[in-house]
């Protein structure tokens, strides 16, 4: 029962579970403060003045995050999917959320074992992954992941369609502009930068077609890009709305369908 209660507190809080809600809020605030600390540390003068505070804050945060991680490993056996005391914990360790938790805390401990300055800089950058721990405590994030999973076939199809259009546009403009602008459209991969900027309607203006055929292709790409890149957004919006409606059809207290 003790393990079961700890797991309930660590997971996303239910409507009437005050202890779990308090823990969710506490962890979310701590994650936010960690991200803020990472940002402020890049201000050299500010960091130099409060260096000791930043170091202590990071250490305390890691201790809390580590305790949460190991408590999850310890109590996960109360879930049916991880029931086996050893195999279940190994299975949980390799689950996506557990791996995110591990990656978020691992850089801190690795800095004690690695002396290479270049690797240490990379590890310090990875500290920003602490913000991914918020996914564990966000019901909205779980709704989004469910939406993506359920709409995966449609999203993959739209991504294939987008890539196909990108390839057609970049190939067409390469053959249209290569002779006129060999420095800017030197190959199809280099033309892809123009195609991406055009299809996403960003249009940086550093590379642009000057031939008549190139301009026609650019116009077509811009027009198709508006509709094509709106397609995944529409799919996700529709799926998200369906998931939100589904949540409202179940009682928040007992989970029974209304």
Image: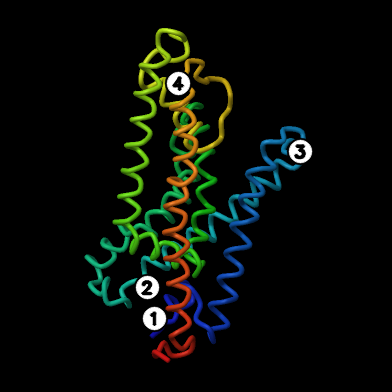
At 59% across and 63% down in the image, what residue appears? 28
Quarter of the image with the C terminus is: bottom left
Q: Which of marks 3 and 4 is in front?
A: 4
Instruction: State how far apart marks 3 and 4 are (Cα).
Output: 51 Å
Q: What's the residue at 58%, 51% (across, down)?
A: 59
Identify residue for label 1.
4
In this view, the mark in front (2 or 4): 4
Query: What residue would you read off at disc 4?
Result: 214
Q: Which of marks 4 and 1 is in front?
A: 4
Q: Badge 2: how crowded within 10 Å, few (<14), some, or many (20+)?
A: many
- Which badge, 3 or 1, is on the more N-terminal residue? 1
Query: Along the line of sight, which residue is nearer the eye, 208 or 117?
Result: 208
Q: Nearer the viewer, residue 16 or 61?
A: 16
Badge 3 or badge 4: first in the primary sequence: 3
Work out whether mark 2 precedes mark 3 in sequence or the reverse, and give the earlier one: 3
Q: Are marks 1 and 2 in contact (CB under 8 Å)?
A: yes
Are dots 4 and 1 in contact, CB under 8 Å? no
Marks 2 and 3, Cα distance to the nearest angstrom? 41 Å
**SS type, badge 2:** helix
Q: Earlier in the sequence, mark 2 or mark 4?
A: 2
Secondary structure, mark 4, is helix
Q: Residue at x 42, y 54 (%)?
A: 100
Label 3 sits on residue = 46
Could you tell me how far apart the alpha carbons at marks 4 and 1 are, in whole angstroms? 64 Å
Q: How crowded is mark 4: few (under 14 residues within 10 Å), some or many (20 or more)?
A: some
**Is 142 situated above or below 80?**
above
């Amino acid at each position: 029962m003790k393990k079961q209660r700890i797991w309930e507190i660590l997971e996303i809080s239910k409507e009437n579970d005050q202890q779990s809600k308090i823990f969710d809020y506490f962890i979310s605030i701590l994650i936010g403060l960690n991200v803020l600390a990472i940002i402020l540390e890049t201000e050299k003068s500010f960091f130099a003045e409060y260096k000791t505070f930043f170091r202590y804050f990071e250490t305390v945060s890691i201790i809390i995050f580590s305790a949460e991680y190991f408590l999850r490993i310890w109590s996960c056996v109360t879930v049916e999917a991880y029931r086996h005391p050893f195999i279940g914990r190994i299975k949980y360790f390799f689950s996506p959320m557990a791996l995110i938790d591990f990656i978020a805390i691992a850089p801190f401990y690795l800095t004690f074992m690695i002396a290479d300055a270049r690797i240490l800089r990379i590890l310090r950058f990875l500290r920003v992954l602490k913000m991914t721990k918020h996914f564990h405590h966000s019901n909205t994030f779980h709704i989004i992941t469910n939406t993506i999973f359920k709409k995966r076939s449609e999203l993959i199809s739209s991504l294939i369609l987008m890539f196909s259009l990108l390839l057609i546009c970049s190939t067409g403009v390469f053959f249209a502009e290569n002779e006129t602008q060999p420095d800017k459209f030197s190959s199809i991969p280099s033309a892809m930068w123009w195609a991406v900027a055009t299809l996403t309607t960003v249009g940086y203006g550093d590379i642009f077609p000057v031939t008549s055929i190139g301009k026609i292709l650019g116009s077509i790409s811009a027009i198709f890009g508006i509709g094509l890149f709106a397609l995944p957004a529409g799919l996700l919006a529709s799926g998200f709305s369906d998931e939100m409606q589904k949540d409202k059809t179940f009682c928040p207290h007992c989970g029974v369908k209304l």
